[in-house]
Amino acid sequence: MRVELLTIGDELLIGDTVNGNAAWLGRRLADHGVDVTRSVVVGDELDVIVEAVEAALGRADAVITTGGLGPTYDDLTRDALAKAAGAALVRDPALEKRLRERADRSGRELKPMALRMAEVPEGARVLDNSAGSAPGLRVELPGGVAYALPGVPYEMRAIMEEVVLPELAGPLRLVRRTLRTACVWESVIATALAPVEAMDGVRLAYLPDPGTVSVRITAPEGRVDEAEAKARELLGDAVYGAGDDDLATVVHRLLIDRDATVATAESLTGGLIGAELTRAPGSSVTYAGGVVTYATEQKHRLLGVPAELLEEHGAVHPDVAAAMAAGVRGLLGTTYGIAVTGVAGPEPQDGEPVGTVYIGLAGPDGEPIVTDPQLAVNGTGPEMRGVIRQMTVVHALEQLRRALLGLDGQPGTQHAQEDREE
């Protein structure tokens, strides 16, 4: 079964409304073994909708539309499906009765315009809407079948779950799993997972964000455990979590398990690491607090970074990061101190290019360590400032995670290590 999605509405085209319906439909159809081959957005224009429906059914077995089934004159999906079918719009007595009863129960007067929702293309099958007023429609067309659903998300989902999915569901139950990694390039992960990609019936998708890559595994129910286990084996300790895990919460749990605490000293991130570490409920047990020393002189005054070090090298230097980490650990009496200093841009600083970041980590086992300063960020435009800051947060949290697990300073796949050595 090949299905195309057609979401309808001017508000989607101009960006006033985010197209969440298409995302939800894609996920649910994939879960049920239905192959979604295309997703298209069109505005509220009759001929454009007709053309899009006909084009979809020239490629796929079915098209699912959302939007355009309400009572107003810009709700044109009914009209478009009638035109595509070469059929007239007719009033459905049962729908009209239901609309009148619904209005009576709410004590409202039923406006004549609302009765547009009782008009259906002749020969169409009405799909009951248990969550609202506008019914769905199933219309047989020359190229296949069209399912028209309301644009209101909870109404669309109700019809989809109760009627459409049971009709379209494939013979295999597909299951999705997500593994989450940090500080490893997407291409490195994809290279490592080539054997999983080759497994019969298994699909992988790579979802990158600054500093992280999530790997979504989609496989038949009987194979998903095998695919996930193989992916974990190949990625090794680069995997920090699964499902809805976020890196800060994983770090929080590790700190609890080890009865450890952490404090932060931040320069270019301006408190973002502390904000992440306080996301988890109960984080006051593991996060003692932080110091934002954005100005160079405050690194000396608040954290005890030697003035001569700052004068000789400036704020962006590995020894400065190490001193900041040790300083905040001593100041707040924690097991670990983590510190970041660097250049978020848009201009170089202290002779260092944009994207240079030093992360210092001080712990109970000896001298502070400092990670590789380069975040491998391409571009120097104003928008990169936020990307660099976000990547710095991820790299700092990953450095702490690895220290808590007793791992070395680099991500854990063989491919990741080889890539860094090159």
Image (tube, rainbow, N blue to C red):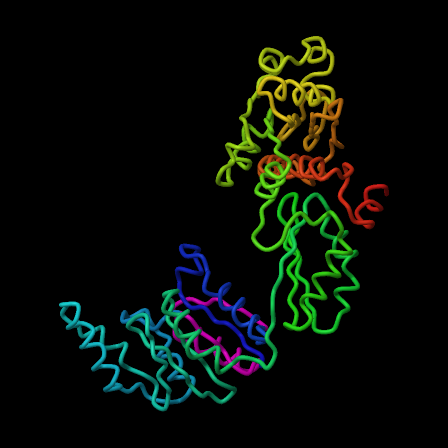
Q: Picture coordinates of residue 183 (x, y %)?
A: 70, 43
Residue nearest the viewer, comparing 190 with 143? 190
In this picture, residue 202 sits left or right of residue 36: right
* Residue 12 counted in the magenta span: no
Q: How many numbered circles are shown?
A: 0
| Residue at image location 32% in from the left, 69% down from the top | 74
Q: Picture coordinates of residue 322 (x, y %)?
A: 71, 22
In this picture, residue 196 sits left or right of residue 218: right
279 to 58, vertically: above or below: above
Residue nearest the viewer, comparing 105 with 353? 105
Q: Which residues are magenta?
A: 37-66
Q: Residue furthest top?
A: 308
274 to 98, vertically: above or below: above
| Residue at image location 66% in from the left, 73% down from the top | 222
Residue nearest the viewer, comparing 41 with 3? 3
| Residue at image location 77% in from the left, 68% down from the top | 198
Q: Picture coordinates of residue 143 (x, y %)?
A: 52, 87
Quadrant in the rendering for residue 315? top right
| Residue at image location 67% in from the left, 39% down from the top | 401
Q: Quadrant of the N terminus?
A: bottom right
6 to 253, vertically: above or below: below
In this picture, residue 198 sits left or right of residue 262: right
In this picture, residue 417 sits left or right of residue 225: right
Quadrant in the rendering for residue 215? bottom right
Q: Picture coordinates of residue 128 (x, y %)?
A: 34, 79
* Residue 52 counted in the magenta span: yes
Q: Quadrant of the C terminus?
A: top right
